[in-house]
Image (cartoon, helix red, strand yellow):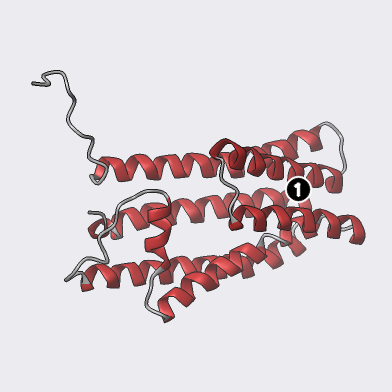
């Protein structure tokens, strides 16, 4: 009766998971790459480190607001990150030290790490909420899914330890290295860490996807 009707699209297959994970990584690459590129362009143009890093933070804040407006969704996380950008800018101006703008990122990294670890303590692995957030269907809450739940616990612990470790490691890197070097080092290292976490989650967490 409907010969030209296309079959319903399956949003639970591995292609969907890969597509959404790729989209997540692409968005992350923009969030990390654009501010770094802006910073070095400003430095090349002759601006001093504090000014270049401050303007880079403004660009990141504008990017966050633009995405929130485009998606018509300004949630608590977006508000927290925006507040963090503004706080970093204010503290940088008050202290005269641009390194504050790099050190501030240890706050969300540490908080995310604690949230992941805390979710393991209460046995409600946060990784499940994260993948659902990016609309990847999971089946770890289905009856008889104890093995899946263990995988989700392990993944949450790995994410938690990774974020906590990076939050701590960022501090000496920012304080010891020259600022121009530190900007590249921390962003490149976090980009590698996040990519490895995503790929590892896709591989090890494959049984979680329905």
Residue at 50% x, 66% y: name it: 162
Residue drawn 90% across and 61% down? 95
Near-viewer residue (60 or 40): 60
Identity of the residue furthest to the left in this view: 1
User: Relative to the observer, which residue lies in front, 59 or 38?
Assistant: 59
Q: 202 or 60: nearer the eye?
A: 60
Instruction: Return the residue nearer the eye: 68 or 60.
Output: 68
How far across and how far down the image is residue 165, in percent?
56, 70
Picture quadrant where residue 169 is located = bottom right
Dividing the picture into quadrants, the one containing residue 5 is top left
In the image, residue 142 lies at what x, y percent?
22, 65
Horizontally, is 67 left or right of 126 in the view? Answer: right
Which quadrant would the C terminus be assigned to in this image?
Answer: bottom left
Residue 179 is left or right of residue 96, and the answer is left
| Residue 81 visible, this angle | yes
Secondary structure of the residue carrying numbered label 1: helix
Residue 196 spot, x, y in % from top left: 43, 54
* Label 1 environment density (alpha carbons within 10 Å; few <14, some 14–19, many ≥20): some
Residue extending farthest front: 1
Question: Residue tagged by mark 1?
Answer: 180
Q: Position of residue 190 (x, y in %)?
A: 56, 54
């Amino acid at each position: 009766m409907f010969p030209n009707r296309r079959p319903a699209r399956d949003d639970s297959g591995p292609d969907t998971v890969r597509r959404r994970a790729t989209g997540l990584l692409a968005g992350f690459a923009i969030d990390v790459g654009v501010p770094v590129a802006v910073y070095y362009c400003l430095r090349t143009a002759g601006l001093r480190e504090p000014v270049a890093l401050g303007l880079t933070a403004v660009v990141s804040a504008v990017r966050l607001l633009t995405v929130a407006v485009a998606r018509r969704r300004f949630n608590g996380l977006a508000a927290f990150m925006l507040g963090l950008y503004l706080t970093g800018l204010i503290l940088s101006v008050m202290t005269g030290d641009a390194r504050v703008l790099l050190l501030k990122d240890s706050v969300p990294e540490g908080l995310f790490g604690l949230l992941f670890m805390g979710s393991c303590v209460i046995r409600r692995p946060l990784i499940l909420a994260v993948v659902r957030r990016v609309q990847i269907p999971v089946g770890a809450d289905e009856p008889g899914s104890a093995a899946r739940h263990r995988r989700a616990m392990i993944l949450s612990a790995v994410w938690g330890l990774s974020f906590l470790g990076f939050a701590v490691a960022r501090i000496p890197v920012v304080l010891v290295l020259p600022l121009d070097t530190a900007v590249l080092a921390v962003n490149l290292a976090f980009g590698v860490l996040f990519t490895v976490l995503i790929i590892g989650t896709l591989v090890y967490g494959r049984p979680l996807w329905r």
